[in-house]
Image (spheres, coloured by chain):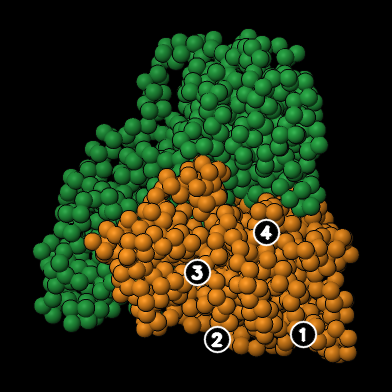
Chain colours: A orange, B green
Amino acid sequence: MTGVGPKRANFPQMANAIRVLAMDAVEAAKSGHPGMPMGMADVATTLFAEHLKFDASAPDWPDRDRFILSAGHGSMLIYALGYLLGYGGMSLDQLKNFRQMGSKTAGHPEYGHAPAVETTTGPLGQGLANAVGMAIAEAHLNARFGDGAVDHRTYVIAGDGCLMEGISQEAISLAGHLKLRKLTVLWDDNNISIDGPISLSDSTDQLARFAASGWATCRVDGHDPAAISAAIEKAKSSDQPTLIACRTTIGYGAPTKAGTSATHGAPLGAEEIAGTRKALDWPYAPFEIPKDVLSSWRDAGLRGGDARAAWEKRISADKNCDAFKTAMAGDYAGVLTKAIAEYKKSLVEAPQKLATRKASELALGVINDVIKETVGGSADLTGSNNTKTKNQDPLSAENYAGRYVYYGIREHAMAAAMNGMALHGGVVPYSGTFLVFTDYCRPAIRLSALMGLRVVYVMTHDSIGLGEDGPTHQPVEHLAALRAIPNLNVYRPCDGVETAECWELSLKTIATPSVIALTRQGLAQARLKQSDENLCAKGAYVVAGKNADDVTLIASGSEVSLALEAREALAKDGIKARVVSAPCFELFASQSETYRKEVLGKGPRIGIEAAVRQGWDLFLRRKDSFVGMTGFGASAPADELFEHFGITPAAVAAEAKRLIG
Amino acid sequence: MTGVGPKRANFPQMANAIRVLAMDAVEAAKSGHPGMPMGMADVATTLFAEHLKFDASAPDWPDRDRFILSAGHGSMLIYALGYLLGYGGMSLDQLKNFRQMGSKTAGHPEYGHAPAVETTTGPLGQGLANAVGMAIAEAHLNARFGDGAVDHRTYVIAGDGCLMEGISQEAISLAGHLKLRKLTVLWDDNNISIDGPISLSDSTDQLARFAASGWATCRVDGHDPAAISAAIEKAKSSDQPTLIACRTTIGYGAPTKAGTSATHGAPLGAEEIAGTRKALDWPYAPFEIPKDVLSSWRDAGLRGGDARAAWEKRISADKNCDAFKTAMAGDYAGVLTKAIAEYKKSLVEAPQKLATRKASELALGVINDVIKETVGGSADLTGSNNTKTKNQDPLSAENYAGRYVYYGIREHAMAAAMNGMALHGGVVPYSGTFLVFTDYCRPAIRLSALMGLRVVYVMTHDSIGLGEDGPTHQPVEHLAALRAIPNLNVYRPCDGVETAECWELSLKTIATPSVIALTRQGLAQARLKQSDENLCAKGAYVVAGKNADDVTLIASGSEVSLALEAREALAKDGIKARVVSAPCFELFASQSETYRKEVLGKGPRIGIEAAVRQGWDLFLRRKDSFVGMTGFGASAPADELFEHFGITPAAVAAEAKRLIG
């Protein structure tokens, strides 16, 4: 990347502009984190004014470099940059309204609120792992479409907190293994955390640690633009990802508080702010940026204009232009509707007993054929999650064009990397582990939901039905815990047909992530008639006994076939039971009251799920019943466990009779 | 440690005994993981026969070395050892019933089921972090009671999965920082994971990585007892924790499958088993152990008898014997009842507006004075979680006698280390972070619950009430998600008095962990009358309006004072509202139907909690209402957020009027 930008001699004052905006905005808000933006101002100035490929007038330019503020508490850094660089919508008023209701300048950077925010950060370590996902997406698309279309770098500012969080190890070891050479981490090496000096809690040699994971490393004075620039330049020619330890002073410029945790997470106070202005030789009023400094920044903001124009020209002439645009658009409604309808037909024509994890693999076979952008993976459970289809080669350092990532035993970084891939665009990530291990990646799942990303979590072994591995591996509370997360669709299909429908919904739902919970054990096919309509789209529907009103059996996943068996047993006693399959609570909750009443019928209700009851009040009233789990599972063959915990057709039939009275 | 044990010449056959028991038990169970026990059999034999300080006839000897099988899927290693060493209750029948209903030999080692199982493992990386906690407890008790009472080591067998999980980085960097020299990790360096060779997913130089965190490291042939023994011996004199990379062959002995992932998680099959018997020169029937081999093992099991006898003698003569026994017993019912009752009285006499996090600090001041075994901490939020009291010095490499751990930004390892500390005994761990970050340590919280450990999670900033930090830091689904976990008490006290009561309950409840959710913002004191009874013990109780039956307002934590304000507003309109404080759903659920009805009254009900509704059907019927959150929060001052999301006394009063009609 080249281009006209401000002179390096102007950098100190440009950096000071960041510093004062950060401290002034925090002071105005009476809360926030001035220390980090003040400490990393020189690094950020050097990066944005000399290296980052971007165009402030086109924040969505697909081939821009990505900049991730993993240390999200330093949000004023990115907001100050947004204003100074001239990003649309980032007015001075936004800075003055830092952390206020309705402003774009939220306490932590939130994706979709302010421009230049590539991902929501704040929960530490997430941004770093998002960046690994973005770099994977870049490498993959570069392999697919070539340098002319995709050739950009990913830069991360990370703090000590990011590097202490476990997710960072998963992320950096994955990045090193995949040799993501276009990934550069600028570590704010300020020796301070909230509790005080880092020496209170850590003695890690971070450079040695990163080197052990295959990273190039170096250390620079984080207040020396020439040194910072040289280190970034060197990173560009490395064949490994690079860690640049930037030795900085937190709260740089604050006369008495600089270098201490007092600058981390609280306003500096009027006196210290006045002292800082003096120390920085910055005689201007709060939020006032002198013209020449602003002009230097605006120059920086437009540096990338020529490069972007050249790219626009190049991409429109590219023979793969259409495929590239299709990939970036990511709209698969048309192809999916057709392919899934056909596939469902084939299932109905030849019903079979299938574990839904296997059904998922079959559906993926269809999907991965018609969508070229899916990139699958698993946290070292490929053969158990059934996430790899025949048409997928491994995505590796030797072959970025591959469409399957062996993520290793790294659930957390896997999930966060998928967020990064979805944010980057051009790929559609899905990946698997056991449902119980959603706990290991829950912070990242939450961020998928908060950001509204199309990320698909394939979570197999979804109940005591996994059998002998025992309670450490048997989810009982996980469906409830996931359903509690706003804007997350939790699917639990009951057979091959529903599995295909849930996959269709997951991929068509652009702004909501999905968890698809799947069984280890085989299940009888419940759906025996072809329906062009996606019945799972309504969240729950009558799968048998449409007009039966003696009792309503409501079940999800593996318990649907159990309910169907109970229905047959009850029929022998002249009791008419309807069976409702409920593959997605969230979608059912969004249906009309009329539809919901119609589906649930007039009889007493029994909810059936091999999990805890919490969340089932969506379907059940106080007088209704629930057949499921009340505590942890046990280690034994699956059939014996269902018997042991009383989750059987006989138990359901008995409960139905008791309810009917 | 010295003692008479088997000769090293016998080790190969002793190791083979482990191998055949593992493969035979897995074959009988038709599921399980033979590869790891077969690969690590030589390492385990060397450790148990020459180094580990233990006495199979006294598995609970407090000064035993701890052995943690972090790679818990290799459970047959520990069960085979249990039988071979002669631990009581570990009969051959138990091995034959591996993974069957009701046996002690669960799929993964479960604490409390089989002897010699020091912690429940299976979720990878947890055991390693538990071990760090055990080593912290040992160092602390050693500093307190001296070498005569407490001087033992902690050994871990960890696999590649343990080392790839992020929690491992948190654990090893904490251990290195604290210079836990008595901690030794034996890494099963077999180059294989479930998906295949490690090279599919990882390239980390683990020795360099551990060295970067302050560990001594070495690599040995994991099938050479002399080399293994020398490495362990060297570890004993190190002033750092030690990683011993044991290069092994997974499934050692299996003629065609050894060294491949085929041996990891499935039975070997009859043919391969026959071949293994041949290769190992082991002509015995399944589960048959020749007398001389068993005799060698039994010798090993009793090696520690003299040492234990000497310890018993020493401890009873120790001037601190009583204090040591009190610490190990951990029963504080008496002192707590008295201290908390007195403290509550002082609160009632001088009511004040307090954030419950501050109230928690005050309660801890009382508690830490009367219980000498509490060891507190925080994941770098000491000043925010208010977990440190004046009487606590930092526990550090320079002062293990300290009672406060600066855990760093390591929520996951912190939680798992607390599990280890509780398992070790002699200390009572509590520690804090923000409630939203329970997500970061959820797998360890789940294990606290599954094992039934007295661990106290102090989780502050428990709602949108934290204000400007925004939705990344505002829990909305976390109370529900935690309440979904079986055997976990989730407390949300409403003022200083309830906070003291919840602390009392947390510390008196031996077999259930606790989460105490606390506010950042100040709350009016709701409890103005002295009650010697712990009212929180029933989970929910009437805090105002005992006989008011127009409407019942049920709230927890910060929303109790809001409900009390709504009650006053309603009173002005002649509406009689009762207010129920519900600090612990789990305890309320366990009360009699009579008590519950009595508390909830006859009026329509409104639940009030600044969180999602899920879980509130414990209190609410379909016709009742809920005032709370339906999605993620936002960044703004707390008062404005409550207004924005409609969680105000006025909104509650309006809803009450609507309900009454």
Mark earlier in primary sequence (2, 1)? 2
How much space separates mark 3 and mark 1, taking CA atoms? 33 Å
Amino acid carrying mark 4 in the image? Asn
- Same subunit, tags 3 and 2: yes
Give percent across and percent down for residue B330. 37, 31
Residue named by callout 3: A583
Q: Residues within 10 Å of mark 2 (few under 14, many from 20)?
A: few
Residue named by callout 4: A386
Does residue A175 appear anywhere in the picture?
yes
| Vertical side of A435 occupied by A106: above or below | below
Amino acid carrying mark 3 in the image? Pro
How much space separates mark 4 and mark 3, taking CA atoms? 20 Å
Quarter of the picture holding the C terminus of chain B? bottom left
Residue named by callout 2: A93
- Same subunit, tags 3 and 1: yes
Chain letter for mark 4, please.
A
Give percent across and percent down for residue A307. 84, 84
